[in-house]
Image (cartoon, grey):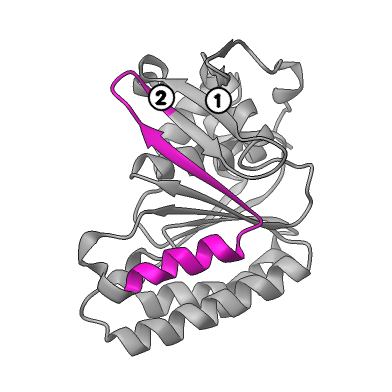
Amino acid sequence: MVLVQQQTMEFPFRTEDSGVVIDAPCHLLAALRRSAVSTDWPKGLVLLSGPSSVYRLGLCAAVDRALAGEPVLYLAGANVFDPFLVGRLARASRVAPAQVLQQIHVSRAFTCHQMVRLVTDCLPSALRSYDARFVILAGPLDTLYDQLVPEPEAMRLFRAMMDALRHLVEQNVQMLCVSQLAPLESGGRSRFMAALRAQARRVIDLREAEDELWLQEEGGPKPRRWIIPRLLWNRL
């Protein structure tokens, strides 16, 4: 089992303008665990959305769970799995990259039909095979924006995927959906993101500025915000 390094991390690290400032790679993993992938709620769908940087954050979340020895199922609808980033984060936590990589089970989809089949047919059996309860869907909507797929067919596939996700959540599976915002040419398919946001138990948006990135969650007793300095982000 992978050594647990995260128990020695403290949080918060420092605050600035009502946001928690994250200043080291291990702190980033801890902040993600306590925000986007909090274990306080054992089940539910959490949506992390924004520009393409969200995919790196989703992979950080996968590494954090793997560091704790937990199997992670990583379904990629966008070709965004980066083993080199996994290796850098593992070494920052003083764990061999191979130990972390063996805990993350990756399946890739290159078409919307493949993505939906992964969620509806393959995922339930994979959860049993790996005794896993945590799933990351990276780019679940990306292939549905393919203009070569007629919109009615894309809508049918989207509904099938959402039905499967609801069923899995009812079985105490925790899911992190990591998705870019809908492209401008998506047309009526932009409602896929709206429907995903409506189904999610929590929605956390990533935003970027010149000197920092930040995660912001609305709702709850008060809005929450986590700040990632650009210097740290560029070192990942």
Q: Residue at x 27, y 82 (%)?
A: 149
Residue in the foreground of this view, choosing between 189 and 43: 189
Q: Disc 1 residue type?
A: Leu
Q: Where is residue 171 in the image (x, y as percent from the top left)?
A: 78, 68
Q: Position of residue 72 (x, y in %)?
A: 63, 50
Image height of 10 relative to 100, above or below: above
Residue 66 in view here: yes
Residue in the foreground of this view, choosing between 10 and 201: 201
Residue in the foreground of this view, choosing between 124 and 3: 124
Q: What element carries label 2?
A: loop
Q: Distance between the residues labelled 2 and 1?
A: 10 Å
Q: Position of residue 211 (x, y in %)?
A: 33, 18
| Res 53 → quadrant | top left
Q: Where is residue 25 in the image (x, y as percent from the top left)?
A: 52, 20
Q: N-terminal of the two: label 2 or label 1?
A: 1
Q: Are marks 2 and 1 in contact (CB under 8 Å)?
A: yes
Residue 110 in view here: no
Mark drawn on residue 236: 2
Q: Residue at x 50, y 34 (%)?
A: 215
Disc 1: which residue: 28
Image height of 112 relative to 104, above or below: below
Count neighbours of disc 1 (C-alpha within 10 A) and say few if under 14, some if 14 to 19, many if 20 or more: many
Residue in the foreground of this view, choosing between 121 and 142: 142
Image height of 49 relative to 235, above or below: below
Q: Which residue is drawn at 64% across and 67% down?
A: 126
Q: What stretch is highlighted in magenta?
A: 189-213
Residue 88 is a magenta residue? no
Q: Residue at x 37, y 49 (%)?
A: 80
Q: Disc 2 residue type?
A: Leu
